[in-house]
Amino acid sequence: QVQLVESGGGLVQSGGSLRLSCAANGTIVGINEMGWYRQTSGKERELVAVHTKAGVPEYGDSVKARFTISRDNAKRTVYLQMNDLKPEDTAVYYCNGEFTLDFVGTTWNGWGQGTRVTVSS
């Protein structure tokens, strides 16, 4: 019912910046929550940042001072501005979202396919 399409990943040197975007496609009447998670091989997927229902951003401890999440409701898109990137930020970044599909209150929660971020030292 909904597709989440990430973009903006790539290769960057330590200290550089990237901006990720995630667009929600499909029949949607409202955004409940959208956020970013990341995962490396053999490790648990972890929270990076989330734009909550209350409109308050939440960040993982390791990125709190360097990353900024924002959302454009009209475009149904969430962004992640990543500054001062470090090699330990290297991972596949996944978009997650929960949406209201109709005025009855039907919701959908799912994940994008991921975008790779590689930070070289």
Image (tube, rainbow, N blue to C red):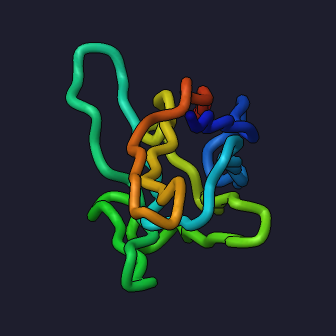
Report the residue at 45% width, 45% height from top: 96
Which image quadrant is residue 84 in?
Answer: bottom right
Q: Position of residue 77 (x, y in %)?
A: 69, 58
Q: Position of residue 67 (x, y in %)?
A: 53, 65
Report the residue at 37% width, 84% height from top: 54
Report the residue at 67% width, 35% height from top: 5
Quarter of the image for the C terminus: give it: top right
Q: Nearer the viewer, residue 81 or 101?
A: 101
- As drawn, 97 above or below 74: above
Q: Is residue 75 left or right of residue 60?
A: right
Q: Is residue 28 left or right of residue 108?
A: right
Which image quadrant is residue 56 in?
Answer: bottom left
Q: Residue furthest top?
A: 42
Which image quadrant is residue 7 in?
Answer: top right
- As drawn, 55 above or below 26: below
Give the number of marks.
0
Report the residue at 51% width, 43% height from top: 95
Q: Position of residue 94 (x, y in %)?
A: 48, 36
Q: Is residue 60 left or right of residue 16?
A: left
Quarter of the image for the N terminus: give it: top right
Q: Position of residue 55 (x, y in %)?
A: 45, 84
